[in-house]
Image (tube, rainbow, N blue to C red):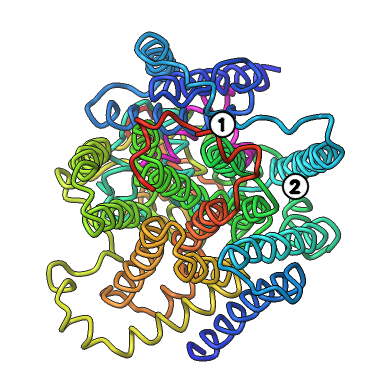
Amino acid sequence: MRVVIGLTVFHFVLIAAGFGVLRGLGLLPRGWRAAASAVGLAFLAGSSTVVVILIALLVLGMPLSLMSAALVSLACAVLGCVFGSDRVPSSLPDAPSVAQPTAMARRWLLRGAVAAMGAYVAFVAFAISRAPTVGDDARLWSLKGLTLTYYDRLRPEIFQSSLGRTVAHPVYPLFQPVLEALFNRAAGQPELRLFHVELWLLVVAAIWSAAYLLWQHSGRNGIWVAVLPLVVLTPAVLTSVSYGLADATGSVILGVGALTLGLWIDRGEIGHLGLAIVVLAAAASTKDEDAVSVAVVLIAAGVTLAAWHDRARLKSWSVAAATCALLVAPWRIWVAAHHLTDSVTPPLPRSLSPVYVLDRASELHTTLAAMTTQVLAQWGWFAAIFIAVCTVTLITRTARQLTCFYILSVAGSAASLVWLYTTTSISLIPLLRSSMSRTVDIFMALTPFAAAHLLARLTPLRADRVARPTTPSSTVVGA
Amino acid sequence: MFVRGLARLSLEVLGLISLAGLVVAVTRGRKRPQLSDLRAGTVVAVGALAVALTAILAIHQLASAHSTLNETRRSVVSARDGIEHCFYEQGAGARLPFIRWVKRQIGTHAVYALDYAGRPDVLCVYLVMLPALPAAVGQRADWTIGFGAIPSDMQSRIRKRDPAVRMFAPGFALQADRNP
């Protein structure tokens, strides 16, 4: 009973913080019914904001506790309520008229699909709720998470490798361990098995968030929405979550971050940029590979804006990129201050030299072969869908700026991963065997979010919505 | 492998665009197709593929005994076994009774030094030993644990029947360094 009550309150607090963040960014629609449809996004935004702030406070020496989490959440909720504003109601897409038979059928079809997905989500939660702690989860994520559960500070024995032995990936950031520690404290006891469900909820919240953002802000819906729930059925995602790994979680959070950045590029609403900062900071605080991809996504946005001579928004972008870096910086400074290194980190600055990379042609080919195999085996049709959709948007001259942003983001993230593997100083074959099946998640998880956004842009507006702008014209910058 | 993968990917992309073209051909009939038709055709083609894949994957995950989901569902463990499972992962389950015994002896939040040999890996031992912590370099431990290997100092104390050293089994012992 203690577990149920504790975890329920914990989630309500995170959702309240998320609603505060969304209201502060002007992304929360007015009305209870509209707000209820944003619960998934609120959970994701709340978790991202609260955990990222708590990591910074932990590094600065403030103890990690439920009280500090509650205070940060309260601050988010109150500041959002005081300084924020409701979203303009006219931007909400109208519900189809009940009188039309096709609209009625569509509505019932949608309800049926949502109910089926709800049942599937519940079944997965049940299936993984008593899975054991194994592999990297035991040796990396839960080891740190359980330490932070029992001790409210960064104990040097576990976090600084001061044992004379190497702790696995000491430089990896703390999003998952901090969330796990808060989860265990809220439950009143270590609940390592049940934490798998929390990771699953984060993945589901990410998909919910993407569907909600596209539904609310593109004003278009249709059969293309099916691309998003396909993510939660992907074997790569299910395996990662059931093993308690951070790969799928970090990747889908990165996907939502890229999507919100894409919405800002497409529509110019500053609230999306604010949300992108928070979500991308959370992704960068999950795994090192995610941090590299966050940098790639931000650079891709900057390059796209520069290529379209969008100087006004380049200023906003530079402020956003600096803020994101500021949010991620505390842990990185702490790692540097304690001279922590990772064995898989490429030798810098030598590995940045193109000559050095090209000199390793054999490693490059091995990496590319392994990556292609894993992309097709783990993520099925996602790569083909993304490439086909990008091809059509470019041919039909639809949202070319947005398409370029997504192509640069996905290609850049894949290239950064190829670079990491090709230039690493440790034995490549065992590393590829043990990790490539998971690390491809980082850029492949971007593809469904990008494809869904581009498909939304390809979808023709229904006749009853063409004449009505979905946002005030003053906030729309991109076309 | 790389070339074969690229070939498969190219065929998938071509297949999808062809499907979109087919949708356009069916919906437009003999009329000249416009770019907007290709847009709509792509949305329908990708959406239909996604719906089909969703159905296939859902049926596989729920119905197949060997699916990721069903295999996970069958690996149900208790809360304690969940944390200790990394021992079984490496075939070291027989060593768990010793660790449980040590945890009862030293209590929570103790600091221990580990003299260690064999399986599982040391990170797994650290996890199971929490909230007791391993001693950092230069830090004095409350306890020394002989885990598969008894250090020479501890061996000589065992021979002298020192009450500070408690034997669990050959190769497994616990020595009190601060609170004998």
* Viewer-closest of B152 and A463: A463
Q: Residue at x 51, y 32 (%)?
A: B105
Checking the image for residue A206, the label placed there is: none
Q: What stretch of residues is rendered in magenta? A: A174-198
Q: Position of residue A15 (x, y in %)?
A: 53, 23
- Picture quarter with the N terminus of chain A: top right
Q: Position of residue A119 (x, y in %)?
A: 80, 40
Mark 2 secondary-structure assignment? loop
Residue at label 2? B76
Residue B160 visible in the displayed image: no
Residue at label 1? A190
Q: Amino acid at mark 1?
A: Pro
The answer for which chain carries disc 1 is A
Mark 1 secondary-structure assignment? loop
Q: Main secondary structure of the magenta part?
A: helix
Mark 2 surroundings within 10 Å by alpha-carbon count, few (fewer than 14), some (14 through 19), many (20 or more): some
